[in-house]
Amino acid sequence: MPLATAQPTGLSAAWIIFRTCVEERLVYRGDFALGTLMRFLPIITQIFLWTAVYKAAGSSIGGFTRNDVIAYYLLTMLGRAFSSMPGLASGIAMQIRTGEIKKFLIQPIDLLEYLLLARLAHKIVYYAVAAAPFALVFWLCGDYFPEKWPDATTWAAFLLSLVMSFALGFYLEATLGMIGFWFLEVSSLLFVYMLANFFFSGHMFPLDFLTDSVPGWVASLLWFQPLKFLAYFPAAVYLGKIHGPELWQNLALLAVWVVFFYVAARVALHRGLKRYSGFGG
């Protein structure tokens, strides 16, 4: 009679998944460093662009100087490295559509836990390999940053905002991917989301530029919407644009959005699996 093989569970299974994902990415993602460096090339265009804008508009726009905007642009690229989840929502939707999601129904692996561990491994490998290009570009552009380093409180808030933006980005996109349980094709919806994300996250320009030119109620919506925490908020915190009670209020709001989308993703997965039908081998 064959002996039963013990199956790893709990933290043991999570560690195996995480370790495997890290090893896998270390093998084939040696292009991280070069790819990251190439992504910084548009900063040259940004410097010329914002120099021309400020030459025509004046020394300050929305509380940002030219140097502030260039530093902001670099910081949003750092923030997006944490919060962006390329292929997550579309990958979940594809697994639902093709039936690949069945493996999570017959194996003792939670879909969201597996995807979170895989994405965490991806980010850790990315940061380890891309740290040198980031450091080089930030050093070369050091003159655009404030001469005085942020204080300890600002540093703590900045780092916390990056970690929480990772969680927000993951669960937000996971929730969008779960829509695949109800609609076979979600690519159009994801395209609209990508456009809104690029604009309302502050990746294109500081949200202060937008809120200064819209009605008060629209500005309030922009400050409370979750996308701003994916790019704008960490950069604004580092540059000292958000401080004091406003800083802690925003961190609390960010935590609320993380919890909201965590629950939303869990509920969508639970209800989606109830209506899911898989056929074949």
Image (cartoon, rainbow, N blue to C red):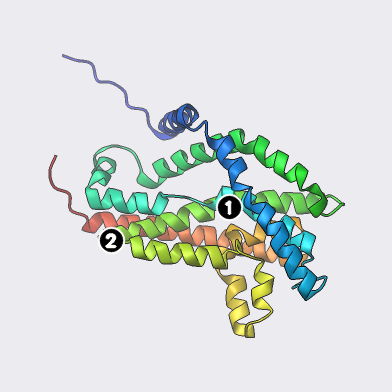
The residue sitting at 58% across, 36% down in the picture is: 34
> Which residue lies most toward the bottom here?
215
Residue 80, numbered circle: 1
Q: Amino acid at mark 1?
A: Arg
The residue sitting at 32% across, 55% down in the picture is: 270
For the residue pair 170 and 90, the one nearer the viewer reads as 90
Which secondary structure lies at badge 2? Answer: loop
Kindly indicate whether the residue at mark 1 contacts the one at mark 2 (C-beta within 8 angstroms).
no
Residue 185, numbered circle: 2
Within 10 angstroms of label 1, few (less than 14), some, or many (20 or more) residues?
A: many
Q: Is 145 situated left or right of 177 in this image?
A: right
The residue sitting at 12% across, 43% down in the picture is: 280
The residue sitting at 79% across, 47% down in the picture is: 142
Which secondary structure lies at badge 1? Answer: helix
For the residue pair 93 and 19, the one nearer the viewer reads as 93
**Quadrant occupied by the C terminus:** top left
Q: Amino acid at mark 2?
A: Glu
Q: Position of residue 45 (x, y in %)?
A: 66, 56
Q: Position of residue 98 (x, y in %)?
A: 23, 48
> Which residue lies most toward the right here?
148
Instruction: Decide: is 56 above or below 120.
Output: below
